[in-house]
Image: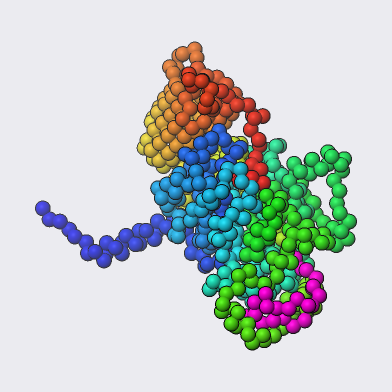
């Protein structure tokens, strides 16, 4: 017997070429430059998904599958495609173990580019901690070392993050390339980036909740968002650019709060100061805050200084927007202290360099712009006297000069236009309810696979799977699986005479003979017995829906139901609109109890860790 040996360098070369081709075939693979941002993804309990996340120590919300991928894969992939690789997942300590295990073992998460995201578990963090309070914890404060992005683990965003990042850089980034954060152990001076002339603000994202067939619902959570147009640029934005839809945010209030105010006061009051300062205001009530925020480094200190802030959306963003036009509010929020250039902990080197006491004049780069249509808001740059040199610590500078007018860097809003053509509109959604979990999964299941897109020469969606049915050979005869609108994962066993239409089947599921599934989501390891009919159902992992004979009088038919992970549904159950859950402490017989829809709050509260 003769053995053929391949030279090691050829083997390595072929392996590298194969890996390269494999990576190029994946829709998430990119080669973006470093964006200069950190990303913090909030991985909370998912209160409105508690049918599937009742045990956060075993199965946190971030691991609930959307179209056969863990939920947290989508914001992670979005960040990597944008070029942001410094990513931190923030989660309560009890959810750390399953997340860490998934990051190391789940094939979808391990296939993401390097470096791996960091896992941060502040000791004081609980399942009900407010989103703003999270960023006051010492662990998170220490972790923020540059401008940063905040986003939820339930985000599905088809809009390229690089487009939002580009808009922020054009409108809000530091002049001359200056940025915020810690450089060589020292905080970058505020005046370097133009904060005193109205630069280095933030950018938030809102999306329309109406008009998306199969996804939009009557009870969708919304916010009141009020914006005012920015000055028109000297050079019009190119076609398809986000600039026409980016405006200055002046109000952001959850619709639930608006209803409470309206019921109490029989109207919704607006301050005259807002109307005096901005003659044209757009108010929208059918959009929702995506909880995606591009924030400058100094916002870290603003959150720390205002201990009353509980919610990022309602408190931090809402009060920041008001501080731009409401007189005296910026002072109450300690923004003068935050935006002051005084370092909080000067070191010995600063003290030694301060001995010369040399004066510098701060240069107003914004005023020198030759392409600006209008003069920026009068800043402290041209109103103040000479300032001490940048190497002089703030605690050695005199405080005899009168205070300059405080210019608050604006918070901008990208308000996605209404859905006029749903096929071309990038999908932006927070998947924080069971109905959205099902509808978004089914929508993603309709996307052409990577192989199908390559065959037609089209660019695959970043959410596309390599194949709609992982192993077609596992499907028995006389079984119909609608590949156009369905997904079937690996190691799935499907019996004969099975009909699967517009459904998502997770890894390791088993479907018995004669079963019928329509508009269903099955998580990993589910068992569906023979002759079972499921319509519009979400079945948790390792559930068992018992089957029976085709001629039995009893049938199992579930319609629009949710089944908790590990639950066993007995043969002969016919029911609609129910949640099958087991509650502990109800007796030694292990009796179960169904929960009505009214017992579940629709949507996660942005004020709590969700």
Q: Quadrant of the C terminus?
A: top right
Q: Position of residue 202 (x, y in %)?
A: 68, 62
**Residue 426 within the magenta-colored segment of the rendering:** no
State whether residue 297 is above or below residue 1: below
Q: Which of these two is toward me, 423 or 304?
A: 304
Which residue is located at x 85 percent, y 46 percent? 268
Q: Which of these two is toward me, 413 or 192?
A: 192
**Residue 407 within the magenta-colored segment of the rendering:** yes
Q: Which of these two is toward me, 484 or 425?
A: 425
Quadrant hosting residue 162:
bottom right
- Prevailing secondary structure class for the magenta stretch in the rendered image: loop
Quadrant hosting residue 187:
bottom right
Residue 323 visible in the shown view: no
Q: Position of residue 258 (x, y in %)?
A: 79, 44
Q: Position of residue 5 (x, y in %)?
A: 19, 60
Q: Is residue 528 left or right of residue 13?
A: right
Which residue is located at x 17 percent, y 58 percent? 4
State whether residue 27 is above or below residue 488: below
Magenta region, residue range: 385-409
Residue 263 visible in the shown view: yes
Q: Position of residue 229 (x, y in %)?
A: 78, 61
Which residue is located at x 38 percent, y 31 percent? 476
Which residue is located at x 12 percent, y 55 percent? 2
How are the residues colored? rainbow
Number of numbered discs visible in the structure rendering = 0
Q: Is residue 67 left or right of residue 132?
A: left
Residue at the far left in the pictured view: 1
């Amino acid at each position: 017997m003769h053995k053929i040996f391949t030279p090691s360098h050829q083997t390595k070369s072929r392996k590298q070429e194969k890996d390269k081709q494999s990576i190029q075939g994946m829709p998430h693979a990119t080669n973006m430059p470093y964006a200069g941002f950190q990303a913090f993804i909030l991985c909370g309990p998912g209160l409105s998904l508690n049918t599937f996340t009742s045990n956060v120590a075993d199965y946190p919300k971030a691991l609930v599958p959307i179209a056969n991928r863990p939920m947290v894969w989508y914001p992670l992939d979005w960040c990597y495609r944008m070029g942001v690789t410094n990513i931190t997942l923030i989660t309560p300590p009890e959810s750390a173990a399953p997340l860490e295990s998934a990051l190391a073992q789940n094939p979808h998460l391990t296939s993401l580019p390097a470096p791996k995201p960091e896992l941060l578990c502040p000791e004081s963090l609980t399942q009900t901690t407010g989103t703003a309070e999270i960023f006051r914890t010492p662990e998170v404060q220490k972790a923020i070392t540059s401008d940063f992005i905040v986003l939820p683990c339930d985000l599905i965003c088809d809009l390229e993050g690089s487009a939002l990042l580009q808009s922020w850089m054009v409108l809000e980034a530091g002049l001359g390339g200056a940025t915020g954060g810690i450089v060589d152990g020292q905080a970058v001076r505020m005046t370097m980036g133009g904060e005193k002339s109205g630069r280095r603000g933030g950018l938030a994202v809102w999306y329309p909740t109406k008009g998306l067939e199969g996804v939009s619902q009557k009870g969708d959570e919304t916010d009141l968002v009020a914006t005012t147009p920015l000055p028109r640029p000297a050079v019009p934005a190119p076609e398809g650019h986000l600039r026409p839809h980016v405006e200055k945010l002046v109000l952001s209030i959850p619709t639930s709060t608006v209803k409470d105010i309206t019921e109490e006061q029989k109207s919704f009051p607006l301050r005259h100061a807002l109307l005096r300062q901005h003659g044209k205001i757009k108010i929208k009530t059918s959009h929702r805050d995506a909880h995606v925020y591009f924030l400058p480094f100094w916002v870290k200190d603003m959150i720390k200084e205002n201990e009353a802030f509980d919610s990022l959306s309602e408190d931090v963003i809402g009060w920041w927007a008001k501080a731009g036009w409401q007189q005296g509010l910026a002072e109450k929020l300690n923004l003068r202290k935050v935006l002051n250039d005084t370092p909080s902990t000067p070191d010995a080197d600063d003290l030694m360099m301060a001995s010369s006491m040399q004066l510098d004049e701060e240069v107003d780069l914004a005023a020198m712009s030759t392409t600006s249509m209008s003069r920026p808001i009068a800043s402290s740059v041209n109103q103040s006297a000479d300032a001490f040199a940048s190497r002089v610590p703030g605690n050695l500078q005199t405080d005899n000069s009168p205070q300059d007018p405080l210019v608050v860097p604006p918070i901008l809003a990208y308000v996605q236009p209404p859905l006029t053509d749903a096929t071309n509109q990038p999908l932006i959604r927070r998947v924080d309810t069971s109905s959205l979990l099902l509808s978004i999964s089914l929508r993603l299941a309709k996307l052409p696979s990577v192989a199908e897109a390559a065959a037609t020469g089209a660019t695959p969606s970043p959410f596309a799977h390599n194949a709609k049915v992982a192993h077609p050979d596992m499907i028995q005869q006389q079984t119909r699986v609608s590949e156009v609108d369905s997904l079937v994962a690996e190691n799935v066993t499907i019996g004969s005479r099975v009909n699967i239409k517009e459904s998502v089947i997770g890894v390791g599921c088993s479907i018995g003979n004669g079963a019928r599934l329509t508009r269903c989501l099955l998580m990993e390891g589910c068992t569906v017995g023979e002759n079972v009919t499921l319509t519009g159902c979400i079945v948790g992992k390792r559930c068992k829906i018992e089957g029976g004979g085709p001629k039995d009088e009893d049938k199992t038919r579930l319609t629009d139901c949710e089944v908790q992970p590990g639950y066993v549904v007995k043969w002969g159950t016919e029911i609609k609109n129910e949640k099958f859950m087991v509650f502990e402490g109800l007796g030694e017989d292990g009796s179960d109890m169904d929960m009505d829809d009214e017992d579940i709050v629709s949507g996660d509260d942005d004020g709590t860790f969700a």
